[in-house]
Amino acid sequence: MPGEDATTKDRSAVRSLLRLWPYVRPVRARMGTAAAVAVVASCLGLVIPLVLKWIVDGPVAARDPGGVWLGALAVLGLGIAEAVLFGLRRWLVARPLASVEAAMRADLYRHLQRVPVAFHDRWPSGQLLSRATGDLSLLRLFLIFPLTFLFVNGVTILVGCALLLAQDWALGLVLLLPVVPLIVVCGVFEGRYALAARRAQDQIGDLTTLVEESVLGIRVVKGFGRHRSQARAFREKAGRLRGTELVKARLLAAIWAVITAVPEVAIGAALVLGTVRVADGELSAGTLVAFLSTALALRWPVDSIGFLLAMSQEAATATERYFEVMDEPAETGETAPARPVPGTAPAPAAPGPVSAPGPAPAPGSGSGSGSGSGSGSTLPGGLRFEGVSFRYPDAPPEAAPVLAGIDLWIRPGETMALVGATGSGKTTLTALVPRLYEASGGRILLDGEDIAGMPRERLRGLVTVAFEEPTLFSASVAENVLMGGAADAGPGELDRALAVAQAGFVRELPEGTATQVGEQGLSLSGGQRQRLALARAVVGRPRFLVLDDPLSALDVHTEALVEAALREVLAGTTALVVAHRPSTVQLADRVALLSGGRIAAVGTHRELLRDSAEYAWLMSGEATATATGGVR
């Protein structure tokens, strides 16, 4: 289970729930007032037996109907006051605690936007959804009811026990004898129920993940006829959840039976002993009535202990699950000491000398590291990788790094195509530029400034990325595209971006650019989604553009049109383009070959076809035809 460790397993319920205090603190006055009101209301219920004692030993014994009516009115008044106070308690806490839930959900959502991409790689979305919905609802219910009534019922039981002992200490001791075994039973119950509650909430997350994947992948499920296997997987997970819920139900039934039966036996014993003492004249009838009425008034506070403890354990588990996510370190504005822009201060030491480029390499000189370095003392502009290495955070220590010693320079205004076999690390390298992942070693420079020292907001304002898998949101076409632009981007920028991406099809949609594309954009074709994703990437006129195979889903005619429009955009942008086809490579000024996590060669398309067997093999067929038919 992601995020679960020995710390969360060993943490007590009280310690877990105390972590809610920062959220509860702003409403503590209302909650304290509500608890005080509930205590007064509950204690009013304990006054009623004293009124009954007065009625029995007074007006009833004296055969005074007026006194009986007076006592009855007093009982009615106490009952009405108790009901009003409990209603006031609920009014005091309902709105503030709904605000607490909303604040916690907002913080969770905000945190999910700030944690590294690696976190989302290892956490199933269903687990996050269950924490943001079901777990937070459990916490709100806990704060509204169990938290208050564990305190209120505790005070009520203490006051009631004091009244019982004050009325008759012998009968009081009879009722208090079961307290010790009840405490022991509750302790055992708490530990077992906590394990079952955690297992159930994790299983709900797993089931949510399965349902979400089945719905989002419904085309694959239906297309491959896998509905039976998905239904079988659902039944298995639902069956395990059902089994866990039954374990919880059996535990709750057992504790409820014990907590109900033991006090009933004690009350029965006190009734027999009290009746004998009344018959012997040692105890007044009114005292016995008051004693038994007080004992019966304490039944609810005692009986409720079982499910209040159960709800508290579920809330403690929900708190653990919530803070498992919130404890994940978020991306920070600066994760390494900022390195100054050349000309403002001396550059810090880095692996190897930092030198400016010499003249552009002559044809045929592109193989090797691809750094294009010459002699000099100032950092070059553009996009530069210096000794960059990367391994995934959860990779075993003995595993080879995905990228090792990447040296590559993309000159200002230049378009560099990145080519390599499947799994060579192209997408990983592009993800390092906007710091979706942090490089394990080396550094990446934008116009001479180390991106590790840039605030992420500024970095991602300079760099725009279009991913290989286009992701659209449940919003309009315009909203999806303008997401990549400035806050004040308007129709002009939208039209320009759609024109570059050859996305004129949006005009034919029912409501044009205001058309809602639906979840994941599944109402559109793959090529249409990819063109909208490309439009989103270019709408903001970025200084640095990273495109991960942006034209893979387009037909050859549309691809040619997009390439023609895209060349104008790339002319004023420093761009790194992942390419799998010679037609995409044609967009680039130079090409870098990534092999085995390293840059194996750099040069023009023609040069690499001539000098690199691996590149020629990757571009085989169409590449050969292109090389002989007019290459840029």
Image: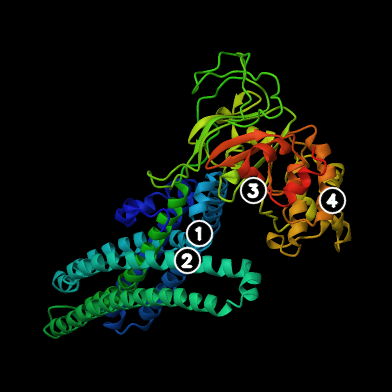
CA gap, disc 1 to disc 4? Answer: 35 Å
Residue 497 quadrant: top right
- In the image, taking residue 116 as reference, residue 470 lies left or right, namely right
**Residue 206, labelled with which disc?**
2
Give, as a three-letter code, the residue at label 1.
Answer: Pro
Which label was assigned to residue 617?
3
Q: Which residue is mark 4?
A: 502
User: x, y percentage for residue 477?
Assistant: 79, 55
Q: Amino acid at mark 3?
A: Trp
Q: Would residue 445 be visible to someone looking at this image?
A: yes
Disc 1 packing (10 Å; few <14; some 14–19; many ≥20): some
Residue 29 visible from this viewpoint = no
Mark 3: give few (<14), some (14-19) or many (20+) Cα within 10 Å.
few
| Amino acid beneath label 2 | Asp
Does the residue at mark 2 contact the one at mark 4 (Cβ under 8 Å)?
Answer: no
Query: What is the C-alpha distance between the residues marked 3 and 4?
Result: 31 Å
Q: Secondary structure at mark 4?
A: loop
Q: Quadrant of the C terminus?
A: top right
Of badges 2 and 3, the one in the foreground is 3
- Check whether the beta carbons of the residues at disc 1 and disc 4 lie within 8 A of each other: no
Where residue 583 appears, as percent x and y from the top left, is: 76, 47
Which is more N-terminal, label 1 or label 2? Answer: 1
Camera-nearest label, 2 or 4? 4
Q: CA distance from mark 2 to mark 1?
A: 8 Å
Give the Cα separation between the discs numbered 2 and 4: 41 Å
Which numbered circle lies on residue 124? 1
Say whether disc 3 or disc 4 marks the residue closer to the N-terminus: 4
Task: State the residue at coordinates (38%, 66%).
Answer: 199
